Image (cartoon, rainbow, N blue to C red):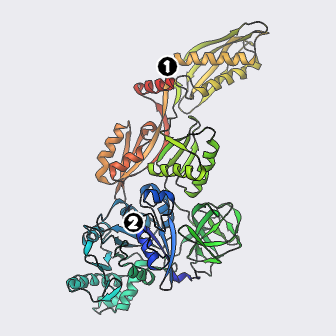
Amino acid sequence: MKNYSSNQLRNLVLVGHGGCGKTMLADAMLFTAKATDRLGKVDEGTSVLDYDPEETKRKISINTVVAPCEYNSCKINILDTPGFFDFIGEVKSAVKVADTGVIVACAVSGVEVGTEKGWRFLEENDVARVFYINKMDRENANFRKVLAALQDKFGSRVVPVYLPIGEAENFQGIVDLIRGKAYINGKEGEIPAELESEAKEYYHQLVEAAAEADDDLLGKYLEGEELTPAEVMTGFKKGIAARLIFPVFCGSALQNKGIDRFLLDITEFFPSPLDVEAIKVRKGLSDEETELSPGADGATAALVFKTMADPFVGKLTLFRVYSGVLKSDSHIWNVTRNQDERVGQLFVIKGKNQEPVSQITAGDIGAVAKLQYTETGDTLCLKENQVIIPPIDFPQPKLSMAVVPKGKGDEEKIGSGLARLREEDPSIKVEKDTTTHELILSGLGDLHLEVITSKLQKKFGVEVELKTPKVPYKETIKGTVKVEGKHKKQSGGRGQYGHVWLELEPLPTGNGFEFVDKIFGGAVPKQYIPAVEKGLRETMEEGILAGYPVVDIRATLYDGSYHSVDSSEMAFKIAASMALKKGFMDAKPILLEPVMLIEVTVPEEFMGDIMGDLNKKRGRILGMEPQDGMQIIRAHVPLAEVFQYSIDLRSMTQGRGDFTLTFDHYEEVPGNIAEEVIAAAKAE
């Protein structure tokens, strides 16, 4: 692939709801641009982009895949993203490095939740947006209905640029409104008579939108002068880059109709890296902001947006260069990790294949293998000109499950395998629960976790099961008690003797454990007192009521006795443990459970359902507030009730809801539930 200058580059991210045909559109674009020699099809498992075995098996995209093609003297980097919400981290990282977002909608299903989410991510990142109504060949395809829904949802700046000629089985091609021509099977002709008046009306809307994007054109337009086709095109291009026009294209990726025109329009109207606003960066480790010069003559700076484990070349780091040029066989400074990285051979990624190149210039996307320290989200730059590009805002995990190995002795392999998978996917989290001793894997949904365990088996040969995690309960007391613990053993030779009197009393929540030594007159010799405390701490760790750690108690050692020959540290340790076990059960023992602060963000129409459901989950509503057309509901809810909340919320809100969950405090478990937990612990 030849070297392209920044103004010849186009970086597009395809976003939209699962099943709208993003991957099929990308495959059709690659085929039309002669980047591939056959039209790949998702349903037949021949897609160039869905090459991962998991994707082929499930017939869905799981990873963001980069595929460049060359058309009309430009290089178009296509970033094809998954449509399922479990893989939203992949979408966010791709949106971060794109200059234009193509929001793909199905001509039958129209505006779906994924359409809205795609728009929102692009809007948050100030990325230019266009719509592509795909599947015009499908039964019940209805361009005008989908167009009306898009305008209703996203406003009057949504303007059609293409009109379909026929729909469903009669779909033949498109009318290009800007050029005033019809294109059927790649052949140019006149606009069909039945579409003429509609085409005129929409062209008028386009002219108005184009005029608004340029002050000179607007003046001319308002004075009643007619804009020339070239002026309309100039205004149209400016309007897309400035996010003042959101044009609507259409076609059929499956039948490869309208794709050649779309590719041409991408090269002529979509912004290059030089046409978009310069990105704001931090200077080195200071808080001072500056802008990156988007050209090849600036100081080199790149953002890592994805890490892949390639079976042949090892760890592959994908990046976008924002300024300057990155060359093969050079050195670059990782400012995020404060490390020098040696850059070997650079590649251009094309699906699962890599093509070696000598350099990656400003605005382009490339890859390099075997970087030692670099992770997704890091900034690479010159050591003498350090800047930090804002990292990718990955979504927080929503669903946590306990990982149980199927085979013995696989724990180490599981740990290293999950660490490698986390490099590829920063939206997963792996941690060991210190209370329950379970390995907890967290992700964005059940499908996400299913895919991770499947990869664990295929890539690292480890089979695991996922189970609902145990709740990290804790135990404490509500009453005060004085208790004796005596350990006396006589069995030939030296005996064992330890004897203590303890007072146990509750402490305020969160105070842990307090040991008080109130021994007078040597009733318990000084050298045995640490053993008493150790015996108490070890017993507390094991738990008494249901095997959970004991917290928030004060144990005061105030009396006891000893034997000059038979007493030992071990004997006093056992005596203390006996006293604690007995006294704990007499001091009104209770179970404590973790209570989470949940913040649920939903459209207003779902508020009643959400609040009713939280009440059923023993939640206490703390308050509500509107934000950006949505409602945020805050509540305290026990962790035991919300392990599966991501699945519940998705079904209650058709995927429109979102939530965050953070630990807040521990509180007493209601009696009836505590009885069940204790019974289950004893049975286990």
Q: Which mark is on residue 119? A: 2
Whole-percent x, y for residue 591 in the image = 49, 27
Q: Residues within 10 Å of mark 1 (few under 14, many from 20)?
A: some
Q: Residues within 10 Å of mark 2 (few under 14, many from 20)?
A: many
Give the mark count: 2
Q: Earlier in the sequence, mark 1 or mark 2?
A: 2
Q: Is residue 49 above or below residue 250?
A: above
Q: Is residue 551 left or right of residue 146?
A: right
Which element type, helix, strand or loop, lies under badge 1? loop
Q: Is residue 593 above or below residue 629?
A: above
What's under tag 1, amino acid-wise? Answer: Lys
The image quadrant of residue 242 is: bottom left
Q: Is residue 151 left or right of residue 193?
A: right
Whole-percent x, y for residue 270 in the image = 44, 79
Q: Is residue 503 above or below residue 70?
A: above
What's under tag 2, amino acid-wise? Answer: Trp
Question: Which one is nearer the viewer's eye here, 126 or 462?
Answer: 462
What is the quadrant of the N terminus in the image? bottom right
The answer to whether mark 1 and mark 2 are in CB contact below 8 A is no
Question: Which one is nearer the viewer's eye here, 105 or 226?
Answer: 105
Kindly identify the residue that appears in the image at 55 percent across and 76 percent down: 363
Whole-percent x, y for residue 153 in the image = 30, 66
**Residue 179 appears in view:** no
Tell me the distance, in whole angstroms, between the alpha carbons under discs 1 and 2. 56 Å
Q: Is residue 560 above or below residue 532?
A: above
Residue ID for mark 1: 588
Q: Disc 1 vs disc 2: which is toward the camera? A: 2
Which element type, helix, strand or loop, lies under badge 2? helix
Whole-percent x, y for residue 96 in the image = 50, 67
**Residue 172 appears in view:** yes
The image quadrant of residue 314 is: bottom right
